[in-house]
Image: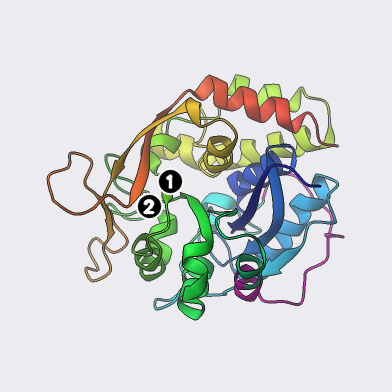
Amino acid sequence: MTTGQSLIIDTDPGQDDAVAILLALASPEIHLLGITAVAGNVPLALTEVNVRKVCDLAGRTDIPVFAGLDRPLVRPLITAEHVHGKTGLDGPDLPDPQTPLQDQHAVDFMIETLRREPAGSVTIAPVGPLSNVAMAMQMAPDIIPRIKQIVLMGGAYFEVGNITPAAEFNIHVDPHAAAVVFASGVPITMMPLDVTHKALTSTDRVAALRNIGNRTGAAIADMLEFFERFDEAKYGSDGAPLHDPCTIAWLIDPKMFVGRHCNVEIETSSELTMGMTVIDWWRVTNRPENALVMGDLDADRFFALITERLARLP
């Protein structure tokens, strides 16, 4: 008998994606059904390998990993090697993965899993572009009411953009997919830059991960020290925002976050603001609320959780 919340992680690793995967694997509150890879931070050929390397790092070669879409629904792919390095997981020298790549397409896995598992039992945590999730919804609309919730990292409001002046990377890469997901009616919890930019890796927080003394802690510390360079130079901060693990942390301990229900619309027609998440934070429209948008978190509690959980891994 498995316990914990049934979860599919949809991801494009990415150093912060790696922490999100490891946090899920180390947490008994989570029952990870599988991990789906999508093109985003780096192309699909690298993201699917990176997912499997992270599973290896955790000693979990049993986790089923699936490759999904290699490009957004409508637009050409934009990647972020300038942030994550040429492999997407620059920092540590991780060996070629032993965790196998499943033959099934990620979208087919999502559809099949949602049809098989009890309705309302499976959460999806997308921490990259929403291409796979939107494609599954379009191919099999019958799965939409069966999804328990979607807990995603993406978008911004007061922090506006990190890839363009108006847009956050994950939403900007596939705004048309985001529009499908936000219009789906599935309960959505959204981790925008407004909250993730408060989850900063500091020197002390990275040192605590290295001082765990295990293989996982050392590898993650190496990843974060590489990852920090870009954001420290860009924002003048001590450390970098640990965006993606906010989704998993919320599933484990939602009380560390503060947010509000809002309407969120996705810009898909203006090149100037393509992928902007137009969040009615002040409720100035009559548009219906379609997401729980997070705005703040207890960063010390967040990093304490990550450090305590990663200590449980090899």
User: Residue at coordinates 66% horizontally, 66% vertically from top-left?
Assistant: 113
Residue, disc 2: 168
Percent x, y of residue 243: 50, 42
How far from the left and from the top, in percent, is residue 161? Answer: 32, 49
The residue at 43%/46% (across/down) is: 189
- In the picture of the structure, the residue carrying the numbered disc 1 is 189
Let me know if residue 173 appears in the view.
yes
Q: CA distance from mark 2 to mark 1?
A: 16 Å
State left or right for residue 239 relative to residue 191. Answer: right
Q: Residue at x 49, y 36 (%)?
A: 241
Q: Nearer the viewer, residue 32 or 47?
A: 32
> Main SS of the magenta segment?
loop
Dot 1 amino acid type: Thr
Question: Can residue 237 be seen in the rendering of this structure?
Answer: no
Residue 277: in magenta span: no
Report the residue that reaches farthest toward the front. Answer: 118
Labels in figure, total:
2
The C terminus: image quadrant: top right
Q: How has the structure been colored for display? A: rainbow
- Callout 2: helix, strand or loop? loop
Nearest the viewer among 136 and 35 is: 136
Question: In this view of the protein, which residue sits in the foreground, 147 or 130?
Answer: 147
Q: Which residues are magenta?
A: 90-111
Callout 1: SS? strand
Residue 220: horizontal and vertical position, in percent?
70, 38
Q: Which residue is at a point 66% across and 62% down the rendered structure image?
A: 117
